[in-house]
Image: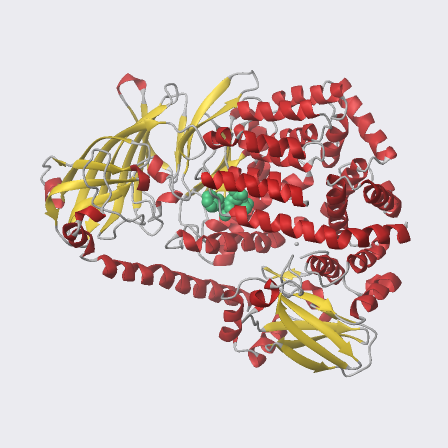
Amino acid sequence: MANSCRKLIFNIYLVFYCSAVIMPHICICSQFTSSPIDQFNKDPRAFPIATNGEIFPWHELRLPTVIIPLHYDLLIHPNLTSLDFVASEKIEVLVRDATQFIVLHSKDLEILNASLQSEEDVRYRKPGESLTVLSYPAHQQIALLVPEKLRADLRYSVAIDFQAKLADGFEGFYKSTYRTLGGETRTIAVTDFEPTEARMAFPCFDEPLFKANFSIKIRRESRHIALSNMPKVKTIELEGGLLEDHFETTVKMSTYLVAYIVCDFTSVSGTASSGVKVSIYASPDKWSQTHYALEASLKLLDYYENYFDIHYPLPKLDLVAIPDFASGAMENWGLVTYRETSLLFDPKKSSISDKLWVTKVIAHELAHQWFGNLVTMEWWNDIWLNEGFATYMELISLNITYPELQFNCLESDSASGGFCYSDSKKTSNTLAFQLAFLRKNVELKEMMATWTLQKGIPLVVVKREGRSLRLQQERFLSGVSKEDPEWGTLQERYLWHIPVTYSTSSSHAIHRHILKLKTDTLDLSEKTDWVKFNVDSNGYYIVHYEGQGWDELITLLNQNHTLLRPKDRLGLIHDAFQLVSAGRLTLDKALDLTRYLQRETSIPALLKGLEYLELLYRMVERRNISDVTENLKHYLLQYFKPVIDTQSWVDKGSVWDRMLRSTVLKLACYLNHAPCIQKATELFSQWMESSGKLNIPTDVLKVVYSVGAQTTAGWNYLLEQYELSLSGAEKNKILYALSTSKHQEKLMKLIELGMEGKVIKTQDLAALLFAIARNPEGQQLAWNFVKENWTHLLKKFDLGSFPIRMIVSGTTSHFSSKDELQEVELFFESLKAQGSHLDIFQIILETISKNIKWLEKNLPTLRKWLLITT
Ligand code: BES
Ligand code: ZN
């Protein structure tokens, strides 16, 4: 049942997706059938000017669709000594409508020559006719002008020779370096194309809808290996000792998923149940960190093939740890690339949360092999389909393949048939029952439209009056309260069909109702002390209880929290703090709700509470509100003393035990809890005395290093170890620890090293600035640095790139004062004036405004609550 249902869902998705891809595609074609040439003939002045001064025959950012690529033959020869590459390609194209030019993408490539052969020319081996190449860099396009009009419905072969430098950054075909154990620096060449950087590596139709087959050949020296999307078919020895690897032709695929690497990496391999060969590659000295990824990817590949009931279509799958990588990972078909910390697991240095991260990233990228690679969005506006499904699949696959790592299914809920159910067996609330209920009560299509066509999340407001429950739905707005003038406009026309569930004090039954109207009333069959909506937090809505509702639940939690299920308790904490941000609940109520946490045995619920409390602490600490900071510190240490004191400094217990240990000890040491500092200092000294050889338990490694980094000797020693360490997981922990120093000159030194890019790689600069900006002693330093070095930063990263976004938002969005807001506004204005505009500017300014409002409203309440409570 569940299996066929899944297949059905996938097939519906496939049909929906295909129609979404094909239909607009057809529309676009008809729109352009005769337009390019006609338009050009009508008004050549409407067209841009190419670099040679001639008219460039195409003025749109999107390519014309009169010509489509069918097959690419690529030959690439990177030189890892001179750091450049020469290449040639033959693209077989189909002309759909007669045309006099071929427009394709090309960025920073030197085109040496281009020629054209008709099918007949190819058959009779007639040499190609040379083409004029025009270039319009503003659109990253070149146009090949043909002497005679290309005829509709015929195939042609376009040959281009080109060359370029291996790129300096993290995009296109770029160089990456790593240090060996012996201290030698080695270079590799690697690609990263999503979304639009394939054009930096070869001229191509660089839009996801132009799918084609690729036959790739790579020349290399014998000390290197070459990898690409497909397995190697053969290697040819060329004159002079060079080797040329030929790879099998790919399935039809988008350009952004093409990949190749020339490196000297070593690998571990295994075979999935379906026969697919899976290999994990890393630089030779990191080979010992590859085994966990192999185990996980084999398991996950088996799972997905089974779950989707569609074979992974390639004969092999390689996962490669790249020493310099801008993001976390990239799902190139058959050759998935990862930042080292997203793939490698070092049993001695990687913590349980590192393991969870690696597993999640592998699960995510493997899901893309179906969602995104097999079915692909027509254009980037639908990237959310790719990323949304891959992210969703992380949860689905991990809950089954790694139930012990299960996370956002919590506790020991029953997972069956590849799905994650909540408490189903306990409550006889089976999937069949839920489906039967939905079928009977719901127009599914109508209901789904309210979720897919409206953004955001609904808020269900519940008011109990005797035996009657009054329900009302709104659009939930974080940071906007009902009194704000914009509230009304932001609410307009939002209405969901919400399947709500609730339980009450008087029975164990789960009650169900579909809330389709703005307001509705339900009748309770019996008198009840409390009512809790969104059973097990399974629904996608936030609940606010008006009247006595929250007080009743607070009392319940304090008297006997086990009457509610763990996920209900976690959900209540989440909703309460969210409602504080929306101005619907006062902070003291949310804080009162956390008072039961001392007795909480469900670790996820406890972690959720601690997360919000730590956020409060960090906010007041950053703003230097010393009385509240001190009182909150005192409260946290007193109140959570039992849980802090029972933590041991070992890697033992369940995943959740280990997560709790890391979080609690990190918080306790951050709050200067003496026993915690003492133990961490002791471990750090032993580690230093052992010259870094002692194995500190991985889950407390970060806190031990952070405490150690507070002395100059410790900080210097950590920096030395940072340089030497071959474990990305350890390096991340050391860098974080170094960034918590209270000394400005040490923080500045880190930034300088990050800018230099040798000891601290450029790929880690954004995370470093983010971490320093989170340190109260570093926030001003990081912010000033970004302001004063903006042009330097733009030399390292593209304006819209992930690192730039992280740097800008990481150093500003935690601000919570009017002065800071004004400073950020001024800076953004000056950037805009220079032509550096980012869409995130507006979001950041709104976030800071919300922080200001939050603090104005809630600081007095927090102050008072602490005085009463402590
Ligand atoms: N395909 C994305 C990376 C990407 C997205 C690159 C958009 C360029 C434009 C990849 O699958 C991804 O989502 N990577 C994440 C890691 C993941 C586990 C969330 C990343 O890099 O942060
Ligand atoms: Zn993704």
Left or right position of 781 against 668: left
Residue 723 visible from this viewpoint: yes
Left or right position of 471 against 801: right
**Res 533 → quadrant:** bottom right
Colour scheme of the picture: secondary structure
**Res 456 → quadrant:** bottom right
Residue at x-position 45% and y-position 46%: 275
> Could you tell me which quadrant the N terminus lies in?
bottom right
Left or right position of 447 against 558: left
| x and y percentages locating residue 260 in the rendered image | 39, 35
**Res 506 → quadrant:** bottom right
Left or right position of 749 against 527: left
| x and y percentages locating residue 103 in the rendered image | 24, 44
Residue 800 visible from this viewpoint: no
| x and y percentages locating residue 821 in the rendered image | 62, 44
| x and y percentages locating residue 731 in the rendered image | 63, 29
